[in-house]
Amino acid sequence: MKKEKLPAAVAALRVMQEWGVERIYGLPAGSLNTWMDALYDEQEKMDFIQVRHEEVGALAASMQYKFSGKIGVCLGSGGPGATHLINGLYDAKHDNIPLLAIMGTRDEKELNLDAFQEFNQNPYYNDAAVYNRRVAYAEQLPKVIDEAIRTAISQKGVAVVEVPVNYGWVEIDADSFYSSASSHRKYPHPLLNEEDIDAAVEILENAKRPVIYAGIGTRGNGDAVVELSRKLKAPVAITGINYDTFDYAFEAQLGSAYRVARKTANEAIDEADTILFTGSNFPFSEVEGFFDHVDNFINIDIDPHKLGKRHQADAAILGDAGDAIRSITQKISVKEESPWYRANLDNIKNWSEYTSYLEEKTQGPLQLYQVYHAINQAADEDAIYSIDVGNTTQTSGRHLKLTPKNMWRTSALFATMGNGLPGALAAKAEFPHRQVWNLCGDGAFSMVYPDIVTAVQYQLPSISVVFSNREYGFIKNAQEESNQQHYGVDFMDIDFAKIAEAQGAVGYTVREIEELEKIFQQAVQDEKAGKVVVIDCKITDDRPMPVENLVLDPKHHAQEDIEAYKKRYEAENLKPFREFLEKQGLSSRHQ
Ligand SMILES: Cc1ncc(C[n+]2csc(CCOP(=O)(O)OP(=O)(O)O)c2C)c(N)n1
Ligand SMILES: [Mg+2]
């Protein structure tokens, strides 16, 4: 009997399908011809999303996992298409995201002879990838794809597979390969070591000024963190990528720390004596000596490699952050509402009055703050936010009113600009019935806006809010701290609404506060009607408050400097944390 045969590339797609892959992002090329034929054959079971730049495809694939936990796949042609993928691959590497990148290359006979567009590709990806191979012969193609996906998922990283173009067409035996997807099991949570829990509990029992630092390891366990916070009377600082784990109205939420941050978190950590650091890889702790002053540092992580990585730990707990937090909560005694806790609650309230004041202004030129107010008013309660890199990363964490029903995702550790729109494409493809927002700066949007066409073409509606301040604001602000001059940071005004319209999307321009409400309500209707929307918000170039560099405390700054700072940041009623500490009979550690 004749054996059933199928093209090797189709076999590879079947393996991917078993792993749950529903779409591939990419852009065709000669070296991808066999993949395109296979995708044509499999189009009933799998989508090909044609992007306008391979980087957008790679970023969409990476962001897809951040939103849905499903591995993303991207394609790049041999040579230039493959090298275009690199930012997406590094985004995935840095954020521990499983991703499969397939690179075309020339027919095997032409390899290693400096053929057109040919180069020794694998070494280029070595640093980014946990698996990085060229397929050795046609029959191996589905097996290598299976190995690549299994490695990417189990090691939470990037798998790169280079495929000579002729292999994909070779007819292979249908029974010569299989997918190991059905054997996939998640690592179980490590059993907690009770001695380590007890050591942490003892430290916390004696802490006078505890702060819980909740990283993304606590995602899905916000309730457990809140319970511990209320029992221990410890405010909660969060990693910047963890906003949606907590309800914005949680009374003891300090927000995130350092620069992409809120005042309250920096001040609390600065005055704390004990940090409970859970499920976080906060990269600024060593560089800035962020926790150097504390008496005790407790480190919880599910990854042994992270224990003690960011700061020397006095107690270390290997385990799932939720499990460990629950165990600590069970063992710890209920604390009275302490002066430390009250001072923090007051400080949080003072900060939230400040941000509300900015957001709710009805007079004056349009600032970014009022744009957030419009978003908060117009957004669905389970809206998804894809956040680009720049001021938006910082300000969305201050002004968006998030709850665990939302999702807020960005390019966190690699922090590449241009991830917002790819993230919105991926989010809508994964969650077609949820409202999707892309919040980005004008610089970041300029890197990727041709892919608005992709959203239009594939009917993946979203609302892109462009914060147009006509500058690379986040970098201009950094220059203010370190350079003598601003240089290379300003650019011309761009009409993004017009660009959007030219791409078949709906474009709006907002110039005044009073225009916001109507346009945002209309945009929401448009998105629901299946349209891709771009709202170009022409905002002032006001710098958002640098909370890592506060000038509010008369003990440390001249009155005129404080007045100038308050005036510039419209912060007349904002108080230094010292005032709240002293009101509670405590003193600052900076005398
Ligand atoms: C690909 C890339 N290039 C450069 C940077 C450095 N960088 C970080 S934020 C930023 C400016 C962002 O400008 P824009 O998108 O206009 O946002 P704004 O801060 O003005 O709101 C730059 C250049 C980066 N993170 N990624
Ligand atoms: Mg800008």
Image (cartoon, rainbow, N blue to C red):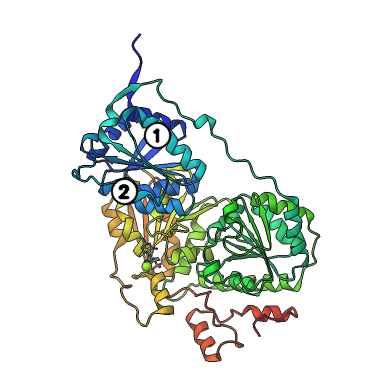
**Residue 540 picture quarter:** bottom left
Please tell me whether residue 164 is drawn above or below residue 383 in the rendered image: above
Location of mark 2 (residue): 54
Of the 4 image quadrants, the one containing the C terminus is: bottom right
Q: Going 29% across and 53% down the picture, which residue do you hit?
A: 450
Q: Going 35% across and 14% down the picture, which residue do you hit?
A: 3
Frontmost residue, 524 versus 586: 586
Residue 126 coordinates in the image, percent (x, y):
38, 49
- Residue 144's tag is 1
Type of amino acid at the residue the image marks with label 1: Val
Identify the residue at the far front of this view.
112
Please tell me whether residue 245 is drawn above or below residue 158 in the rendered image: below
Q: In this image, 343 relative to 380: left or right?
A: right
Type of amino acid at the residue the image marks with label 2: Glu
Q: Is residue 432 visible?
A: no
Of the 4 image quadrants, the one containing the N terminus is: top left
